[in-house]
Amino acid sequence: MMSSSISSTPSSDRVPWHVLYQNALFETDHDKIPQRITEAENAILSRIRELFAVNTDHIEEDVLLDDALYALRALRTCVLPDATAA
């Protein structure tokens, strides 16, 4: 079960965004899905801020980050229909 792989602790800040993203996508415990989505979204937004601050070509990762955010929002809408206003 995916729910035991990552806990909601400050150490989650060091987990790469794509790991938290996969944890959200494959979480099997319905009660933990909102937490996983939030962790992944926060990590992705943090990475977007990091990339904004550097002066290098990161277009490919920008696309991946945008796609991941879109997928997480779709997951939130599908799994948690009451969260469509969020």
Image: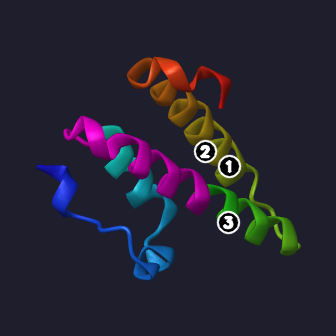
Q: Residues within 10 Å of mark 3 (few under 14, many from 20)?
A: some
SS for dot 2: helix
Earlier-in-chain disc, 1 versus 3 = 3
Looking at the rendered structure, the kind of residue marked 2 is Leu
* Mark 2–mark 3 distance (CA, rounded to whole Å): 14 Å
Q: Are marks 1 and 2 in contact (CB under 8 Å)?
A: yes
Q: Are marks 1 and 3 in contact (CB under 8 Å)?
A: no
Which mark is nearer the camera, 2 or 3? 3
Q: Position of residue 40 (x, y in %)?
A: 50, 54
Which mark is nearer the camera, 1 or 3? 3
SS for dot 3: helix
Residue 16 vertical placement versus 85 (above, below) = below
Labelled disc at residue 60: 1
Residue 55 vertical placement versus 44 (above, below) = below
Q: Position of residue 79 (x, y in %)?
A: 39, 24
Labelled disc at residue 16: none
**Foreground of the two, 60 or 17:** 17
Q: Which residue is mark 3?
A: 46
Residue in the picture at 29% in, 66% down: 6
The magenta stretch spans which residues?
A: 26-43
**Foreground of the two, 13 or 63:** 13
> Residue 29's image quarter?
top left
* Mark 1–mark 3 distance (CA, rounded to whole Å): 17 Å
Looking at the rendered structure, the kind of residue marked 3 is Ser
